[in-house]
Structure formats: C-alpha cells, structure tokens
Image (cartoon, rainbow, N blue to C red):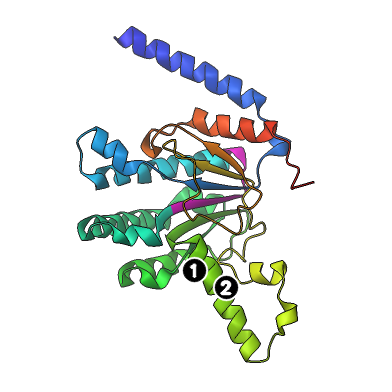
Amino acid sequence: MLRGLLSAIGVYSLYHRWLRMQIDPDRLPEHIGVILDGNRRWASAREMIPWEGHRLGAEKVKKFLEWALDLGIKTVTLYAFSTENFNRSEEEVQELMRIYEENLNEVIKADVIHEHQVRINAIGRIGLLPERLRRLVAEVEDATKDYDRFYLNIALAYGGRAEIVDATKEIAIKVKKGELEPGDIDEGLIEEHLYTSYLPQQDPDLIIRTSGESRLSNFLIWQSAYSELFIVDVYWPDFRLIDFERAIRAYQSRYRRYGK
C-alpha cells in the first residue's frame, strides 16, 4: 500500500512538472474568477455535516491563493456566498459566517498577504452580513488598502444581478441630482459603478467552476461577458494544483476573438 502511495505521488509530481512546462508565463490570465462549488456535496458523500465541507473548502482557498501568487496571477475573485445562499438553513448560514470570520482573522495576520502586498476586498451587499463580520471585513480592507501588487476579491452576499441593480440606482440618483445626463450613460459609466470598479482589470479572463456544473450562477454577470470558462468535475475541497494548471493551459490554448 505504501509503495502504491509513493508511486501515485511520483506520478502526480511528474504530471505537475509536465503541466507547468506547458504554461507560458507571458500569457497568463490577468484576472481569474472561481466559483467554489461542491463543498456541501463533498461533505454529504462522506456522511458529514455540510459545514465540514465548507471548512475544508476554506482550507483549499488558502492553497489556491498560494498557487495563484506563485504563478503571478494579478487578480483573483472568489465566489464564496451568494445572495441566494441566505435561503439555506439558519444553522448552516451561521456556521458559514463563523467560518468566514475565522478565516478573515487569519488572513489579516498572514505573512503571505503582506509579503506579496495583496489588497483584499469583499464585494457584494455587505450590509446584509452580520455586524461582527462587517467590522472584520472593514478591518481587513483597511489593513491592505495601500497594496497594489495583487488583488483578492471575496464575493460575499453577492449577486451579479444585484450588482447591476445597485450600479443602476447610483447612476439614477446622480441623474436625478443633475450630476449626469441620461446621454452620459454608457458601458464605461456603468463599469465605474460596479463593485469591482477599483480593480485594474474588472473582467476575468478565466472563470473556473468546480463540481462539474456548467453555469455562472449569477457570478460577475456583467464582467464575464467574454470570459473563458473552465469546468472541473471535482468538488472544491478536492481541487488540486494540477487542476489549476490544466485550467491555465486550456485558457492559453484558446483563441479569444471578442466577437471579431
């Protein structure tokens, strides 16, 4: 059994090195979005309570961030909790909020964040989150606000349609006040009012979704108009470095025409 395990590790290591050699460091995606899907199903398959899957998923997020930083990916946006997720059981939502608190407390002290100068922001209807979590989000954002080498966006209480509605309301208020004319409204103006407006590149080049589901689920609806999609048939806690490298390789193999 040990021999078989060592053999599997050896094969994995070889495959990882082979994949890494195929990745062109000059053609990396600037911005990657990730739909972290399958935590509950991972737990259910092992007859565990749902939030045990979420805890393992949170540990995988830390690994993923290390992989992205190692490759030099400038911006990562993680779909952690949608507006629809509030419809889950009260107990599960409370456990999820507790997991986010624990991990944000770790993040603010993590050497990797400060060494790589990662700016962290939560995007979404943050006012819907519990007060303790809102205060912690503000603390993390304040501690990293001057960093600009890398960007980590955590979509919490997020919905792509809600984002467009919120942007539209802000623009409508400015029109009502006479600060804007209706004729001033174009794509650029809308983008200036999205949650992601502070980013050097709002639109993700690549969106990765785990669990085998092939839909966006209300994630970055505006920004993903021309994103490349990569579907991975594993639950998020089982996502591996080689899965990430395969996604990068697939992205680099595609010819992006932007409708031309």
Left or right? Give the position of 143 relative to 3. right
Task: Give the residue displayed 56% in from the left and 57% down from the top.
Answer: 221
Instruction: Tell me residue 120's x, y (percent).
Output: 51, 59
Instruction: Tell me residue 243's x, y (percent).
Output: 50, 30
Tell me if mark 2 has few (under 14), some (14-19) or many (20+) residues whose alpha carbon lies within 10 angstroms of its own: some
The residue that disc 1 covers is 142
Instruction: Tell me residue 67's x, y (percent).
Output: 52, 38
201 relative to 69, above or below: below
29 relative to 146, above or below: above
The residue that disc 2 covers is 167
Say if residue 109 shows up in the picture.
Answer: no
Task: Give the residue displayed 57% in from the left and 73% down from the top.
Answer: 167
Q: What are the residue bounds of the magenta stretch? A: 70-79
Query: As shown in the figure, which amino acid type bears the numbered disc 2?
Result: Ala
Q: Earlier in the sequence, mark 2 or mark 1?
A: 1
Tell me if mark 1 has few (under 14), some (14-19) or many (20+) residues whose alpha carbon lies within 10 angstroms of its own: some
